[in-house]
């Protein structure tokens, strides 16, 4: 991750990681009302979203690296906690779908996917 993060970028990071607790709380609530199969999709390449490319004034459509780093860190932070929760609950199946790498592969090698 970049070492020179602005204050607003730092706040965005903190807010994003607080979402981990919300995902876990929602998963627990779903279990409490009877769901036994719960899947979560990890964050995608946030730094490649058109809104972020515009907001951070990307040159030539280059993805915003620190935002992608945050997405990877968030997924790496959430995944083990999500499965720890699953391990603590009886008769439940949790799934975590990581879409970051496939999305980045499509962005970096569009011809491999028949794009362009």
Image (cartoon, rainbow, N blue to C red):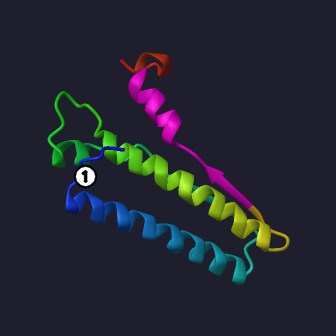
Crowding around mark 1 (Cα neighbors within 10 Å: few <14, some 14 to 19, many 20+) is: few
Residue 27 screen position, x and y as percent: 63, 72
Instruction: Say which quadrant the C terminus sits in.
Output: top left
Question: To which residue does mark 1 refer?
Answer: 5
Considering depth in this image, is 71 or 38 the residue closer to the camera?
A: 71
Q: Is residue 113 above or below residue 51?
A: above
Q: Is residue 6 above or below residue 58?
A: below
Visible in this render: residue 39? yes
Q: Which residues are magenta?
A: 94-109
Q: Residue furthest front?
A: 3
Q: Residue at x 47, y 51 (%)?
A: 73
38 drawn magenta: no
Q: Residue at x 55, y 51 (%)?
A: 76
Visible in this render: residue 37? no
Instruction: Say which quadrant the N terminus sits in.
Output: top left
105 left or right of 49? right
95 drawn magenta: yes
93 left or right of 72? right
Considering depth in this image, is 72 or 103 the residue closer to the camera?
A: 72
Task: Indicate the secondary structure of the residue bearing disc 1.
Answer: loop
Q: Quadrant of residue 33?
A: bottom right
89 left or right of 55? right
Q: Quadrant of residue 91?
A: bottom right
Q: Is residue 60 above or below residue 54?
A: above
Q: Residue at x 51, y 36 (%)?
A: 101
Q: Residue at x 53, y 52 (%)?
A: 75
Residue 95 screen position, x and y as percent: 69, 55
């Amino acid at each position: 991750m970049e070492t020179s993060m602005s204050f607003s970028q730092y706040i965005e990071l903190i807010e994003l990681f607080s979402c981990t607790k919300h995902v876990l709380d929602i998963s627990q609530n779903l279990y409490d009302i009877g769901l036994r199969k719960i899947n979560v999709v990890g964050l995608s390449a946030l730094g490649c979203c058109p809104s972020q490319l515009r907001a951070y004034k990307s040159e030539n459509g280059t993805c915003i690296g620190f935002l992608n780093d945050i997405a990877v860190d968030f997924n790496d932070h959430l995944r083990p906690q999500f499965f720890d929760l699953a391990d603590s609950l009886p008769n439940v199946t949790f799934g975590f779908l990581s879409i970051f790498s496939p999305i980045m592969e499509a962005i970096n090698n569009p011809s491999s996917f028949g794009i362009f």
